[in-house]
Amino acid sequence: MKTVRIANGSAFWGDSQEAPLELLRGGPLDYLTLDYLAEITMSILQKLRARDPRAGYAHDFVGVVKRGAREMIERGVKVVTNAGGINPIACRDAVASALQAAGYADRIKIGVVTGDDIMPRLDEFLDRGLDLTNLDTGEPLSTVRSQVQSANVYFGAFPIAEALCQGAGIVITGRCNDAALALGPMVREFGWKADDWDRISAGTIAGHVIECGAQCTGGNCQVDWETMPDYAGIGYPIIEAEPDGTFVITKHRGTGGRVTVAGVTEQLLYEIGDPRSYITADGTADFTTIKLEQQGLDRVRFSGIRGRPATESYKVSISYSAGFKAVGTLVYSWPDAYKKARAADQILHERFRRLGLKLDAVHSEFVGVNACHGEMSGEPANDIAEVVLRIGARSRDKAAVERFLKEIVPIALNGPPSVTGLNAGRSKVDEIIAYWPALIPKTLVAPQVEVLSA
């Protein structure tokens, strides 16, 4: 059977910039996917584009193209990425410039998938009676409409496959579901139909396994992490996909980390909700049907995957402004470190009260004592060497948050002794960007695909 090798070299914007190049150079590949987007990333990109109409995409991808153009072109590796963010056209133009500078402009076509950005159409949808109800709270979007900063539909794999069918060697999308980056090439290579639910679900699960990069090859893995070989040279994942929907997860030989049933199972459980109904734009995958087999060193085979039809809606990721926040930290040392930190926290809360600060919430953590596990951790030993008091506040009133920060610094001299590591003086007030998940009928939006020479 025909086998297609699809690797993923980026799990988020900020992931290793060496991983894509190591994948391109480390062995045979048919496709390289690069995932840069998360919900908060979209709002950040929206802000960047508001300041500069040429911005709004993950510029790290342009660096990958500059450094890896030769391998992409000469080895025939097609690249699929959601680096387009809020501005896929600008991303395409920047990539085209990079290819021209590298002397490869006439040897590759760039495909762009757009249409996911529905920010300009929000009022139209609301006027038509579409509430874009928050899936978590049940509130209509109208309650925060004036604060909305971005709104993007999660498209699926078929627009990506269409761009590949039109000859694109690089496909740049805006928002799409993460697994679509890998599923799109499978649809293209194997000719899977939109209603072939079992294979679509298998491809979706394959994409889900590799979407977080090295998290499925030993990174951030609880199983035997102390014996993990060569974290410094950890390999990123590769799908070896077959037309019947079975696939193997592996990595390049000689790279660090490991691919095991236990390790990929941890990744399978990442952000899935009900394992029987993992819903994407392309279909509904049933994770309970997955059969896993260790097929040899660093090879895990998936089979038996079943799926169900897609829903009539796309998911929409909306971000909106929800006030302001700031965080300060104070480090207290032995003796009585925890007692001093607790006292400082109480003093600060009392000062906020006496000043009448309009803070919606103030949250304190004692790092080294209970920041990860809260009160479940119990009372610490008296001889604990150091404790970090991390205190944060949020409010709709920016001035109140600014004053909150100013009250933290003085406690270095007018509170409990032995404080160090004071960072409140360098902290700043940040805008809070909140997440609003919603659904939109597929009949109201449609992806657009354009393929041009670089």
Image: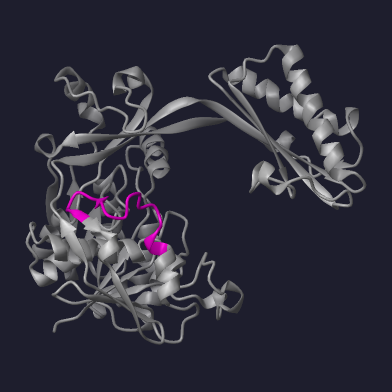
Q: Residue at x 67, y 15 (%)?
A: 357
Name the dominant secondary structure of the magenta segment: loop
Image side of residue 18 versus residue 73, left or right: right
257 or 31: which is nearer to us? 257
162 or 415: which is nearer to us? 415
Residue 134 at x, y = what percent?
A: 32, 29
Q: Residue at x 27, y 54 (%)?
A: 276
Image side of residue 59 versus residue 182, left or right: right
Q: How many marks?
A: 0
Whether residue 143 is situated above or below residue 169 in the rendered picture: above
Quadrant where the image shows the N terminus? bottom left
Q: Is residue 357 visible?
A: yes
Image side of residue 202 versus residue 426, left or right: left
Residue 419 at x, y = what percent?
A: 86, 40
Q: State yes or no: residue 394 in magenta.
A: no
Whether residue 124 is situated above or below residue 386 in the rendered picture: above
Quadrant where the image shows the C terminus? bottom left
36 or 375: which is nearer to us? 375
Scheme of colours in the image: one colour
Q: Is residue 183 visible?
A: no
Residue 66 at x, y = what percent?
A: 36, 66
Q: Residue at x 41, y 72 (%)?
A: 236
Q: State yes or no: residue 271 in magenta.
A: yes
Image side of residue 401 versus residue 344, left or right: left
Give residue 87's quadrant in the image: top left
Residue 370 at x, y = what percent?
A: 70, 46
Give residue 428's quadrant in the image: top right
In the image, which residues are magenta?
267-284
